[in-house]
Each structure stands twice: as C-alpha cells, then as structure tokens.
Amino acid sequence: MTSSLELLQEREQRVLCRTYGRYPLAVASASGCTLVDPDGREYLDLLAGIAVCNLGHSHPELLAAMRDQAERLIHVSNLFYQEEQLILAEKLLATCSLDKAFFCNSGAEANEAAIKLARRYMRKVKGREAYEVISLAGSFHGRTLATLTATGQDKVKDGFAPLPEGFLTVPFGDFSALERAVSGKTAAVLLEIIQGEGGVRPLTDDYLAAVQELCRERGVLLMVDEVQTGMGRSGRFWAHQHAGLRPDVLTTSKALANGLPMGAMLCTDEAALGFEPGSHATTFGGGPVVSMVAAKVVDILLRDDLPGRAASLGDLAQGLFRQVQAAHPGKIVDVRGRGLMLGIELSFPGQDVWRGLLEAGFVLNLTQDRVLRLLPPLVVTEADLRRFSQALAEILEKTT
Ligand SMILES: Cc1ncc(COP(=O)(O)O)c(C=O)c1O
C-alpha cells in the first residue's frame, strides 16, 4: 500500500459505508508493538487493534501456525468433526472453571450466543418463562440488535428501534438497584468485569461477589463479557478470576486469535443443556485456521506468563501515570485499570491531548470524551511505557 492518507480518504468515501469515524492514520504494516504508515513513519501501538493483538503484530509462531493449517485445511463447515476445534476448546477450558465451548466469529456473536443460551436454558431446561437479561449502564456488548439492546449506552441504539424485548439496564456498580431489578423473569445478569468502551471502569470484587451470590440464590445465570478483558489483559488469564468468580457463561473474542476473527462462548455443563443440535450455529465458527492460531495464542500466553507480565507492567504504568498526575495538578482526574487495560481520565475533553500523542507517534484511544485508554500488546516493554509517559507529561505541560 503506497497511497497517501488523503487519497485513501477520498477513495473510501466513494466505496465504503460511513460507519467508522477514522483516526487520521493509515497503517500499511506492523510488527511487534510498532505500526508503520504508508510513508514509513513508525508509531508505538498502545491499542493493539483495540485489545486484539495481545501478542503483538506478525508474531512468528502465529504466522507459522496459520501457514501450516492453511496448507492442510481451511474450511469444511460445522457439518464435520474437526479436531482443531477440540484442541482449542480443551486448552481454553483448562484456563477457567467452564466446561463447554461454542465458537463464533466476533464478540457480538459470542454475546448473542450467550443471550440465546440463557433464554433457551430457562425455557427448555428449567421450564421457566425467564428471558430477561440485565446489564449495566455504561456497558458495551456489541452491535447486533440483541447485543446493542443489552449495551448500556444510548448512542449505539440511535435510529434502530424497535429493539428486541427482554433487556434491562441498571446503574453501574449499584448492588441494591440490581437486586431490585432481578425478578422471576430474569434469565441472566451480563456484565463486563472492567468496562472498556465505558471508560475503563472496574467493578469492585465485593460487588462482583455479591452479584454472584444473588444470581445463585435467585437461579439466574451469571454471564461475564470478557471480550475485552480476557486472554491475559487484566493481569490474570480472565478478569473474573481476580474476584474468584465462577460464572455460568463467559464470552471472549478480540485477543482469542490475535487478529483473526474469532469469538467463543464458554459455559458450564449445566448451562450448555440449553442448546441441542440445530438450536444455534454459524458457518465459520471454529474454522481450522482460526482454531489453530487461537490454540497457539493460549500456549504462548501461558508459556511466557503474559498475564503476569501484564500485571507487573500495568502496576508500573499506573505508577508512572500517577507521577504525571502529581506533576500536573488538576489535569488528570484519575488513573485506573487492571493489568494492561489502563485509563487516564482527564479533567477536560481529551481530543487535543490524544491528537498530540498521535502526532508524537503514540497510538491509543480516547473513550467517553475524557479517558485516554491504553490497551497495548502484552509484549510492550517498560521502555515503551516510560517513553509514552514522558510524551504525555510534555503534552500536558503545554496544555492550559
Ligand atoms: C466488552 C465488549 N463486548 C463485546 C464487544 C463486541 O465485539 P465485536 O466488535 O467483536 O462484535 C466489544 C467490542 O468492543 C467489547 O469491548
């Protein structure tokens, strides 16, 4: 790719639907934690394709797994037994307390599968007309009709009414509000352990433990959306493990195949009774290539203890950002997150700071208008984080 940014913008306007507000950057290639634009300028990637490339870009072992499998078998359909899916399922389930997997292609589809499973489990297994899914304000669960309805942000629903029935949103982190909302109609509570799009907002371990107890008492499924927090990013393999939860359903996607499209819904043997042959499916789900790449991702995360690395580098980064906060009183309101899922909340709209960082060669994201969100590859280095912190300090220095 050699076209300039202006040329790409002009061509895109002619041929693509206007669904994305793009950053003023085109990426021509990438390797490790470095993105390269069409002119050969390098950027430090602190976003990892929005929590996707946890092992960095162009990882040689993943490329080898992809190539090997592509030469053997790319697709046959879920009409056939495929050992690659089993290899992945066995590895993935060994990282958590869940028993069964359903593979799909994205985070929204994983949540869609979870919602369908919850409804069908209640109806067919428990014989109850319990179909409601309760989620939290500020959450993000995807863009299909069901998952955008479950999402606790109005902006994603704009213009799409009528929305499906059976969804309730309660205030973030307010246990009594959740307790009041659970009724005989509730099938499941769906939550992100740390809200990502919502501004890197962690739920407390106490809240999570109380929600789990409530779900058990009332016979409601506890479903954790680990699409963004999963696969080592939070400093544990799964973010719910910090609070010692045992969810009934877990969804994951983004980092699962490090950039190839894949999602998974994991559940207990009991919840899995909700599906039977024919009740849910997808053509590409668990295809041989993505499965073998994802299996390699799991191997490398464990072999190289990348969750542990995320935990220690995350602590280091928060320390660095707090030093910047202390040196610029009033400009940073909060530094938060877990592992390498980090938020720096500014006291003012952050567009200019974000743009200044991009111009200085740092790719990250601005969410909820004021929160600089960092989701770097878990192979980012201490030196990279120090370099970013220094640049942030310099830009804040100039910001009045
Ligand atoms: C927590 C969470 N759930 C679900 C999704 C939807 O995933 P996808 O865009 O792959 O459909 C996202 C995407 O950002 C997410 O962050």
Image (spheres, helix red, strand yellow):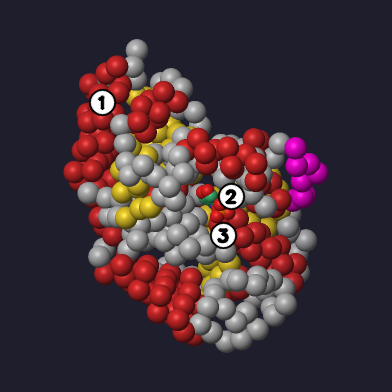
The mark found on residue 393 in the picture is 1
* Magenta region includes residue 385: no
- Residue 233 visible in the shown view: no
Residue at screen point 64% across, 75% down = 273
Q: Which sits in the foreground, 268 or 386?
A: 386
Marks 3/1: CA–CA distance: 36 Å
Mark 3 lies on residue:
106
Q: What is the three-letter code of the residue carrying label 3? A: Ser
Q: Is residue 309 left or right of residue 367?
A: left
Residue 21's x, y, as percent?
56, 37
* Front tag of 2 and 3: 3
Q: Main secondary structure of the magenta part?
A: loop
Choose top left, top right, bottom left or bottom right for residue 20. top right
SS type, badge 1: helix
Query: Is the CB–ligand 1 distance for label 3 below 8 Å?
Result: yes
Query: Is the CB–ligand 1 distance for label 2 below 8 Å?
Result: yes
